[in-house]
Structures are given as C-alpha cells and as structure tokens.
C-alpha cells in the first residue's frame, strides 16, 4: 500500500507539499516526471505531468527518500508544488490513478513511523502536540517530549523494574536456589524507589495536561450580569450574543486565548436563575458542570442587583475570582455584603478595570503552572498507565513480604508493562535478555 496526502495547511499558499509513502513511491515519481529518480535527499526541480499524458501539472521540487532512511521508514517522496487547490487536486488525481495508491488517513505517516520503530509513542504524540501548539509554553512542552525528556525517564524506571523482575523470575525458574540476601534487599530498595518516583511524577497538579489542553476558565453568574459581554471583551471579538434580555446565553460558548503564553479556554455560560424553560434549565446545568470542572471560575455579578447567594456563593473558593460588573452604574457605595469578599470591580461597558481582572487571572495561572519544569505527563493516558503501574507495584511490595513469588512476579510484570505502554515499548524479549546478561545462574 502506498499512501499520499497534502501535508501543508489548506487554503491558498505559495507552496504546498504532497507527501507519498510506501512501496510504489518510486513508481509515482517516475510516472509523474517521466524521467529518472532524483538523487536521494537532494531537492530537485522537475516538471510534473498528468499521468500517461504530456500535459504539465506544475513545475516543482521533488525530494526522494529511499527507505528505511525516511520519516516513515518506507520509501517516501515529497512534491513541493504551487499551493493552489487546482494544482493540488490535479496532482492528487494523478497519484490516485497509480496502483495501490490511496489517500492517507489522519496521522497515518506518523503511525507508520511508530510501527516501523522510527519513533516511540510519546514522540508520536508530541509531534501532534507540536503541530497544534498555539502558545509558546505549549510549543516548549511538546518539543521537550519530542526530544525524549519523558521517554528517558519512563524507560529508566522501566529498566529498573525489568532488572528486579529478572531476579524474581529466576527464582521462579530455579525454585530450589535461594535468592541471596543482598539481592532480596535490592529488589525492595528498587521497587520502593520506583514507587516514590512514580508518586512524584503523578503529583504534578496536572500541569502538563493543562498546558496541552488549555487552562479552563468558566464565566458564571446570574442572568444579565454581563458574562457574555466580558467574554467578548476578553477575546476581542463578538463571540457570544449580548442583549438586555435575561437568559440570552443557553449553550456554552468557548474561546481560546493566549494570556502571556498561557493557553486558556474561556467558557461563557447560561445565567443562573430559577427557570421553568426546559432549554434554559439544560443550559444552567451545563453552566454548573463547567464551573465545577474549571481551573478558575469568574463569578460575575451585577453591581445594581447583587444576587450572590446559594449556588454562586458555594462556588466561591480559592479557584474563583468574584467579578462585580457595571461599576459605571454605581452611584453610592458598594454593598457591605460584597465588600467583605475579595472582588474586582469592573465595567465592561467602559472597559474599566478589565486590565486589573486580567492581571489577577495571570497571577492565578502562574500559581498553577509553578512546577512546569519537571512535567512528564501530558495526557490522561500517561496518568492512567502510571497509576496502574503504581497499584501493581504496591501489590508487589506486599506480596514480596510474604515470599509469594509467583503472584509477586505477575504484579511486577504488569507494573512494568504499564510503564512500557506509555512509551509504546512492550517487548518480552527484553526480560530474557536482562536475565542472562545480569544474573549468573548456577553460580
Ligand atoms: N520537508 C519536510 N520538512 C519537515 C518534515 C518532513 O517530513 N519534510 N518533517 C516531518 O516530520 C519534520 C522534520 N522531521 C523529519 C524527521 C525525520 C526525517 C528523516 O528523513 N529521517 C531519516 C533520516 C535521518 C537523517 O538523515 O538524519 C531516518 O530517520 O532514517 C525527515 C524529517 C519537519 N520538517
Ligand atoms: N451599564 C453597563 N451595562 C453592561 C455592562 N456590561 C454588560 N452590560 C449590559 O448588560 C446586559 C446583559 O449583558 P450580557 O453580556 O448579555 O449578560 P449575560 O450575563 O451574558 O446575560 P445572560 O446570557 O442572559 O445570562 C446587556 O444589555 C449589556 O449591554 C457594563 O459594564 N455596564
Ligand atoms: K443577557
Ligand atoms: Mg450571556
């Protein structure tokens, strides 16, 4: 099978790149250029023709990467052509007529690279993250992981487990031989070391995931407080409908912002009030869910109709900022009920003090991202495998005490396996290798 796809973005561009990977890549180049293959990995200007005709599609740069020295590990080619829809379509159509050639699925080139052992799973994931990075810290996080930062750590923990597993397995294979005392001690030392390490990695306040997915801010409050107006002000565009009618917003409206390099997803939500309307009630439920799952809540209330009780008061915690809006309407003093709460007094209408609110948001963000230096987990998948690995290791430690070797070995195997699954490296052959390299049986 040979796959092809446009690898540059959609829309008109100066240059577009169409990538090809698979057995028939050579054939594709030859049939479209009607001449010899370019020198491998040397950018070569060629005329590109519609297949089986002398009709010119475009003149472009061709790169030929014979496998296995290519991104996917298969034979590959790149066609750098003019970036118009018509040129791209004509090239695609011609390639599609060559036997065994089909359009690539999303991520398929990178999947091939993983399957062919060119990159590990973490690298594959971080390539996707790098491509979708919108802010500087997202880019920095992705590139660190691409460079093997977390793979090295997970691999080294896994190797430690493989080593003690080899001792435990040896004991199973040769039950009559006693494990030397110092080896038993070492097994315990290493397993508790790995447990500590995993606990430390897990204790990260989910910063990596927050960076990858964006820090979640929910705007919540009674109807007509100016929540949608605030969303629009923060995002600098008319993302949500604003009106003087209470209950305007029903669905959750999200905008992505970049605050000082921090990726943020702001959600505007339906105003909270007692409603008989089924649709509005659904919207209010969504709003409360958003607030519950948010990293930060902006609780917006109207200075003129202070309505800050019940649910809203319950939402006030250290991850909330009380925003008192419409300060332009304030003639007298702010009510004492509100004064007792830490709050920001703003007017979206006059764009008054909104900067101060943004400053407070930034401070909250900074506190959340404080440990970002040693972040290794960027997805729930990593967390789950680590948690499972930890559980099995704890089981292992308990059984180790009871010298229940068969079951202990199984726990250790599963703990090791889950670590291996993070990086995408699960190969039993390795255990055999480390048994014979490291452990002198019969001696
Ligand atoms: N034109 C172009 N630019 C690109 C890519 C690409 O595929 N094409 N990349 C695609 O993601 C990124 C660069 N990553 C790449 C990674 C590996 C290989 C590659 O050919 N690897 C071979 C040879 C290694 C070598 O010569 O050092 C290999 O691993 O065997 C190419 C690009 C970003 N820029
Ligand atoms: N005077 C004044 N009016 C404002 C201010 N901010 C918003 N408004 C007005 O308040 C009304 C309600 O604004 P919205 O942004 O729709 O309020 P909301 O909280 O999203 O309302 P719902 O979606 O219905 O819950 C509109 O008429 C706005 O123009 C402000 O700072 N001062
Ligand atoms: K409204
Ligand atoms: Mg609204």
Image (cartoon, rainbow, N blue to C red):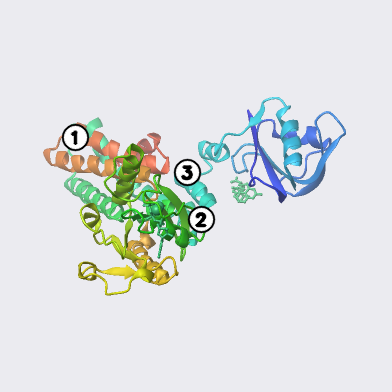
Mark 3 sits near ligand 1, with its Cβ under 8 Å away: no
Above/below status of 137 relative to 408: below
Residue 280 position by quadrant: top left
Mark with earlier residue (3, 1): 3
Q: Nearer the viewer, residue 86 or 305?
A: 305
Label 1, secondary structure: give it. Answer: helix
Residue 419 position by quadrant: top left
The residue lying at 26 percent from left, 35 percent from top is 169
Q: Give residue 120's mark.
A: 3
Q: Nearer the viewer, residue 151 or 47?
A: 47
Residue 336 location in percent, x, y?
Answer: 20, 70
Mark with earlier residue (1, 2): 2
Above/below status of 2 relative to 371: above
Residue 343 location in percent, x, y?
Answer: 29, 68
Residue 221 location in percent, x, y?
Answer: 31, 55
Q: Is residue 105 visible?
A: yes
The residue lying at 38 percent from left, 57 percent from top is 227
The crowding category of the residue bearing disc 3, from other C-alpha atoms within 10 Å (few below 14, some 14 to 19, many at least 20), is many
Q: CA distance from mark 2 to mark 3?
A: 42 Å
Q: Give residue 238's mark.
A: 2
> Which residue is the site of mark 1?
405
The residue lying at 40 percent from left, 47 percent from top is 252
């Amino acid at each position: 099978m040979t796959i092809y796809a446009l690898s540059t973005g959609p829309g008109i561009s100066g240059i577009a790149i169409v990538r090809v990977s698979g057995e028939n890549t050579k054939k594709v180049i030859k049939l479209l250029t009607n001449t010899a293959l370019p020198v491998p990995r040397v950018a070569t200007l060629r005329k590109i023709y519609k297949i089986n005709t002398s009709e010119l599609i475009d003149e472009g740069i061709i790169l030929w990467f014979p496998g296995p020295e290519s991104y996917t590990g298969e034979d590959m080619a790149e066609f750098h052509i003019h970036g118009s829809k018509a040129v791209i379509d004509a090239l695609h159509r011609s390639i599609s007529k060559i036997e065994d050639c089909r359009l690539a699925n999303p991520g398929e080139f990178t999947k091939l690279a993983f399957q062919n052992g060119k990159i590990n799973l973490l690298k594959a994931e971080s390539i996707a993250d790098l491509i979708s990075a919108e802010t500087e810290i997202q880019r920095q996080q992705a590139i660190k992981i691409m460079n093997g930062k977390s793979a090295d750590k997970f691999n080294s923990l896994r190797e430690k487990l493989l080593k003690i597993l080899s001792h435990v397995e040896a004991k199973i294979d040769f039950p009559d031989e006693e494990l030397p005392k110092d080896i038993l001690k070492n097994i315990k030392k290493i397993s508790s070391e790995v447990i500590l390490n995993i606990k430390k990695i897990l204790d990260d306040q989910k910063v990596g995931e927050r960076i990858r997915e964006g820090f979640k801010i929910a705007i919540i409050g009674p109807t007509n407080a100016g929540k949608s107006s605030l969303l629009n002000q923060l995002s600098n565009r008319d993302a949500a409908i604003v009106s003087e009618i209470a209950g305007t917003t029903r669905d959750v409206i999200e905008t992505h912002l970049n605050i000082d390099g921090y990726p943020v997803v702001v959600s505007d939500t339906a105003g909270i009030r007692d409603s008989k309307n089924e649709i509005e009630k659904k919207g209010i439920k969504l709003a409360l869910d958003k607030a519950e799952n948010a990293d930060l809540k902006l609780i917006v209330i109207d200075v003129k109709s202070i309505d800050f009780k019940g649910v809203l008061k319950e939402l006030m915690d250290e991850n909330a900022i009380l925003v008192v809006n419409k300060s332009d309407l304030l003639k007298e003093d702010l009510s004492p009920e509100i004064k007792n709460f830490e709050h920001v007094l703003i007017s979206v209408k006059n764009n008054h003090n909104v900067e101060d609110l943004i400053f407070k948001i930034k401070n909250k963000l900074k506190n959340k991202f404080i440990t970002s230096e040693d972040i290794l987990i960027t997805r729930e998948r990593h967390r789950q495998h680590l948690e499972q690995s930890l559980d099995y290791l704890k089981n292992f430690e308990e059984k180790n005490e009871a010298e229940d070797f068969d079951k202990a070995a199984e726990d250790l195997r599963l703990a090791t396996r889950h670590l291996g699954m993070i990086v995408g490296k699960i190969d039993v052959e390795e255990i055999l290798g480390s048994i014979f390299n490291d452990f002198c049986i019969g001696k």
